[in-house]
Amino acid sequence: MAAPENHFKQALAKGQRQIGCWCSFGEAITTELMGTAGFDWLVIDGEHAPNDIRSIRDQLVALATSSAEAVVRVPIGETWIIKQVLDAGAQTVLVPMVETADQAAELVRACRYPPEGTRGVGAAGARATRFGGTPEYIQTADAQICLLLQVENRIGIENLDEILAVEGIDGIFIGPADLSTDMGHQGNSAHPEVRAVIADAITRIKAAGKAPGILGVTEEATQAYADMGAQFLAVGIDVVLLAQSARALASRWSAHGTD
C-alpha cells in the first residue's frame, strides 16, 4: 500500500482553481465542521492560531473523511516542526516568511526522505503510515507531499524569481497583510502600490509554472485576487466568519429593542 494520493497537489499541477478557508480556532470540532462546507482546502494554522502538534494532529483526524485537503501552516520554517506535521499525517505544508532560495531549498529537503532530503525515517508507528499499515509509505511519500511557501515581505519579493527556480516547490502564497505592512502601509493590502506588487508576483509565479495563492478577507479583495489569477484562493477565516455573523445578528435584533 502506497501513500495516499494528494488530490490538491494534482489539482494545482493541472492549473485548477482551488477555493479554501482558514481554520483558526485550534479545535478539532470546528475544523470538522468546516470540512463539511465544501471547500477544496482548509488551513490548519500553526502560526497565529493556538495550535500545537497534538491539536494539529486532532484536526487532521477531523478532516480525514472530508473532501477538503488539510493544509498545515507551520509556525516557522524549521525542519523539526515539518517532520512532526508530516508524521502526523499532513501531506500539504504551508511555510511562512520565506525570503531566499537557500531557505526554500532547505524546506524542500525537509519534506523529502534521504538521499534527496533530511526527513527522519521514523514514521512506521506514526499516523502518516496508518501506524505501520502503509508498507510502501517511505518509497512513495515524497511524490505526494505538496510544499507551499509564503512570500510576504520586500526581501522575499526581491528574491521571488530565485525562489521559484528551486525544484520541489508546488506553489507560492503571497501574504498581503505582512507584505503591505513591510511596504509601509501597515496592513492596508488594498493600497494601489501593494496591489501592483501582488499582481506582478502572481504573474511571475504562474510564468514559472508554479501555483500562486493568497487570502482575501473581503469580497472586493477576493475578487481582485481572483482576477489577478490566484489559483489556490482562500476566501475567509473561520473565526472572522463567526465573529461577523454573531455581531451582525446581535446588532440586528438589538436594534429592534424588546417588547
Image (spheres, rainbow, N blue to C red):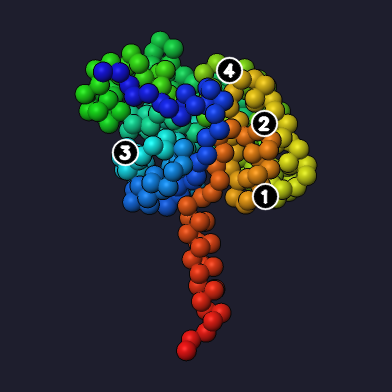
Residue neighbourhood size for the residue with mark 1, other residues' Cα within 10 Å, grouped as few (<14), some (14–19), many (≥20): few
Amino acid tagged 2: Ile
Q: Nearer the viewer, mark 1 or mark 4?
A: 1
Residue 3, numbered circle: none
Q: From this viewpoint, is residue 64 visible?
A: yes
- Disc 2 and disc 4 in contact, CB within 8 angstroms: no
Q: Measure the C-alpha gap from mark 1 to mark 3.
A: 32 Å
Q: Nearer the viewer, mark 4 or mark 3?
A: 3
Q: Measure the C-alpha gap from mark 2 to mark 3.
A: 32 Å
- Disc 1 and disc 3 in contact, CB within 8 angstroms: no
**Circle count:** 4
Q: From this viewpoint, is residue 179 visible?
A: no
Q: Secondary structure at mark 3?
A: loop
Q: Earlier in the sequence, mark 1 or mark 2?
A: 2
Q: Residue 241's x, y, as percent?
A: 50, 56
- Disc 4 and disc 3 in contact, CB within 8 angstroms: no
Residue that appears at 59% across and 23% down: 210
Residue neighbourhood size for the residue with mark 2, other residues' Cα within 10 Å, grouped as few (<14), some (14–19), many (≥20): many
Residue 65, numbered circle: 3
**Residue 144 drawn above or below residue 93:** above
Per the image, the residue denoted by label 4 is 166
Amino acid tagged 4: Val
Residue that appears at 55% across and 33% down: 17
Residue at the right extreme of this rendering: 193
Front in this rendered view, residue 247 or 89: 247
Q: Earlier in the sequence, mark 2 or mark 4?
A: 4
Left or right: 106 in relation to 156: left
Q: Measure the C-alpha gap from mark 1 to mark 4.
A: 33 Å
Q: Measure the C-alpha gap from mark 1 to mark 2.
A: 17 Å
Q: Residue 234's x, y, as percent?
A: 55, 42
